Amino acid sequence: MHYTSRADAGRRLAGELKHLRGTDPVVLGLPRGGVPVAFEIAAALSAPLDVVLVRKLGVPWQPELAMGAIGEGDARVINDDVVRLIRISKDALAQVEAEERRELERRTLLLRGNRKRIPLKGRTAVIVDDGMATGATVAVACQSVRALGAAKVVVAVPVAAPEAVWRTRVTADEVICPYTPADLGGVGNAYDDFHQLTDGEVTDLLAIG
């Protein structure tokens, strides 16, 4: 299976989500890449579109190595194995978390602007990304929307590594992914057009949706 673009992936994925009509869903894209996919799903389900934001907690001297992640609604996951391995102090971890919490708030304001977060209490939250390599980011997003009151959490992605789907099923009520190649390599391999989206592209879609 191959997608020409994120929009194409969203339209095709929407066909797998017809059963969610009538469940009062809110479609939540993970910025940036998940938003164009989520936009098409929200349109197909006649559902409101919003974002759910997550920030990685990178090791100070090796930022690409995640020692955890945070999300909206005070969602927080710490990778205890990494923390033990690098022997980072509680104070240093708290400092990184405080910095990323500020960045999370900044990104939220940038992408949502003056629009209020769509209430999730008692509703079905459909978390959408353009793909999952590990599932770590989506796992924190699941925690986040549950903290915000979602009654049911559905994860919908066009492509994912089989291991990521397995891990995500621990935190989500339902995972929908039509394409799970054993040799994924990278999410971008499933797309012809996988360009780096700008914040402007994301905010434009949110304004329409």
Image: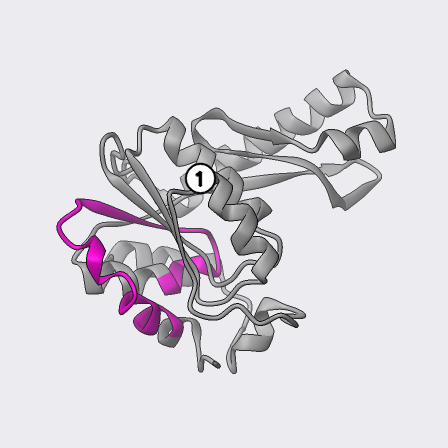
The magenta stretch is 9-37
Seen from the viewer's position, the closer of residues 60 and 176 is: 176
Q: Please, which residue is most extreme toward the left here?
A: 22
Q: Residue at x 38, y 64 (%)?
A: 36
Q: Is residue 146 left or right of residue 85?
A: left
Residue 16 lies in magenta, yes or no? yes
Q: Which residue is mark 1?
A: 142
Q: Is residue 86 left or right of residue 149?
A: right
Secondary structure of residue under mark 1? helix
Vertical order, 65 against 134 (above or below): above
Q: Position of residue 101 (x, y in %)?
A: 56, 29
For the C terminus, which image quadrant? Answer: bottom left
Name the amino acid type tagged 1.
Cys
Q: Residue at x 78, y 29 (%)?
A: 83
Q: Residue at x 48, y 61 (%)?
A: 33
Q: Quadrant of residue 120?
A: top left
Q: Quadrant of residue 70?
A: top right
